Image (tube, rainbow, N blue to C red):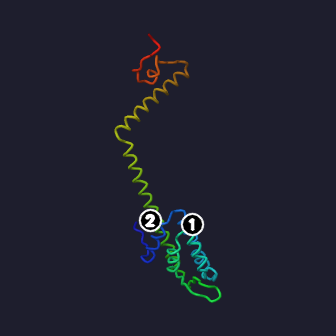
Amino acid sequence: MALAINQASNPHLDALFQVGSVRREQAINFFVKILTNIIENPQEGKFKDLNHQKISGKFAKWNVNEPMIELLKQAGFEQVQCSEKGQRLRLNNDTSKCEQVLNDLYTKQQLEQERLEKERQKIIEANNKRLNNAANLKKRAMKNKILAQHNEQMKLAKQGIYNVGSSVSDRKGTGNGVNSLSY
């Protein structure tokens, strides 16, 4: 299933996803909170008029100031200068752009999750290939053989039968050790 992202928001979303996952998630949560407040309360004016300096400061704290402000502008916000309040980000009355930008963001998150899952699978395959070579398979077979012999010895020991060889190597099953105590 091919997921489509608005071409205008794509470079800003790409820039957002270049930031580390912790900061990105914090910025996304704040961004989603702004837009969902607008979508859920379209008549509430306080959600449509944001202090540009405070919003920029929050996004700058997460190193995503420019892409997030641009995404807000794509959602319908305009940067305006007010004499009494300073620079503001104001939304026109059209909330459909907010929904579109949110959908683009959710789509980008889903695409990123799919990309990460593919990367994980590649790493798992490479590790399996590396670990399943002839030498490691031989070591694993020897280890399983020794563990099976040990388990058998423990079962016999619980029954009171102690099958102790003359040397440690005999008890481990290699059988080629020499008992240094016998003459």
**Residue 157 location, quadrant:** top right
Task: Looking at the image, tell me whether mark 2 or mark 1 is earlier in sequence order.
Answer: 1
SS for callout 2: helix
* Residue at numbered disc 2: 111
Confirm whether residue 28 shows in the render.
no
Disc 2 marks a residue whose amino acid type is: Leu
Going by the image, does 101 lie left or right of 129? Answer: right
Q: At x 54% / y 82%, what residue is drawn?
A: 77
Indicate the position of residue 19 as horizontal and vertical percent values: 49, 66
Label tally: 2
Image location (x, y in percent) of residue 9: 46, 75
Which residue is drawn at the image coordinates 42% and 57% (left, top)?
119
Given the current orientation, which residue lies at the most extreme top position? 183
**Residue 25 figure quarter:** bottom right
Left or right, residue 32 beside residue 84: left
Q: How much space separates mark 2 and mark 1, taking CA atoms? A: 19 Å
Q: Name the amino acid type tagged 1.
A: Gln
The disc label shown at residue 26, or none = 1
Q: Which residue lies furthest to the left in this view?
A: 134
In front of the other: 172 or 160: 172
Q: Position of residue 56 (x, y in %)?
A: 57, 76
